[in-house]
Image: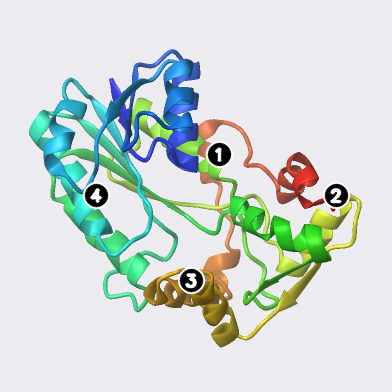
Amino acid sequence: MILVTGATGQIGGETARLLQAEGRAVRALVRDTASAAAAALAAAGSEVVQGDQARPETLVAALAGVEAVLVVSVNDDRQVEREGNVIAAAAAAGARRVVKISALGTAAGSPISILGMHSAIEERLAASGLEWTSLRPGSFMQNFLRYADSVKAAGVFYGCQGDAPVALIDTRDVAAVAARCLVDGGHAGQVYELSGPEALTYAEAAATLATASGRPVAYVDVPPAAARQGMVDAGLPPWLADDLVGLAALFEGPLGRQTTPVVADVTGRPGRTFAAFAREHASLFRA
């Protein structure tokens, strides 16, 4: 039995679907079993169980008989506590293998709090006695779906990535690597940095979206302070807005543009290109 936490999210949900397609026994941890996403997981063959990473008492039954666990969650200021609860519960339940979704640039003492929290969670995982693998993806292609309304309305999207190329990765490729690490041997103790197969500037990404959607699309770079204020105005906590601006600055350097062979090496197929992603989602960007 494989437990997938964050099962209604992009990476967790896709990991569950891939494992189900292989005929694996999957248990999906969700907070709301009545949600449409939970119903879809159940219809596809997952055993859906209610639980909350922030409430350790709900994890005991979810982990009964589980051999491998995917640990993934949203970014918030309790992430170390929540994911730490899952790791501790997995060890107590006798699980053997844990795969954690971390982030590119993770480092102890990072001024970007998300990266520091991931580092603290990885330390707990390494000390747990479990067989573990940590996946550190970079910036997601799916983040561009947030720009769909702006592109539809005005043919433009805004950011603070400058003219730096970034090796964007499709979340489905992250899930494909996670699925293999959960099932196959040979990945214990590994920290994998994941990227897409190519690095593009956001201006090049805009041109790719334009080609796919058949309409003009432009990228407008804004100062980091203005980007941060826009995120706060949209409802993001100030600390998270600071982190996202910090990540954009970090990815302007060599780290953001590096490409790695991990997706192909682990899954046996190349990662998706941004052009393929743009074609698949082109209708979302058309007026």
Q: Which residue is mark 3?
A: 244
- Return the disc, 1 or 2, that comes first in the chain's sequence: 1
Quarter of the picture holding the N terminus? top left
Q: Which residue is mark 4?
A: 83
- Return the disc, 2 or 4, that comes first in the chain's sequence: 4
**Residue 176 rendering spot, x and y as whole percentages:** 50, 34
Q: Which image quadrant for residue 216? A: bottom right
- Return the disc, 1 or 3, that comes first in the chain's sequence: 1
**Residue 93 rendering spot, x and y as whole percentages:** 11, 30
- Give me the disc on residue 270: none
Of badges 1 and 2, the one in the foreground is 2
| Relative vertical location of residue 50 with respect to residue 231 in this rendering, above or below | above
Left or right: 53, with 177 as reference point: left
Type of amino acid under label 2:
Ser
Q: Nearer the viewer, residue 120 or 76?
A: 76
Type of amino acid under label 1:
Arg
Type of amino acid under label 3:
Leu
**Residue 102 rendering spot, x and y as whole percentages:** 37, 53
Residue 41 visible here: yes
Type of amino acid under label 4:
Glu
Calculate the distance from the C-alpha at mark 1 to the C-alpha at mark 2. Answer: 21 Å
Q: Which image quadrant for residue 129? A: top left
Q: Which residue is mark 1?
A: 172
Calculate the distance from the C-alpha at mark 2 to the C-alpha at mark 4. Answer: 39 Å
Q: Nearer the viewer, residue 159 or 96?
A: 159
Q: Residues within 10 Å of mark 2 (few under 14, many from 20)?
A: many
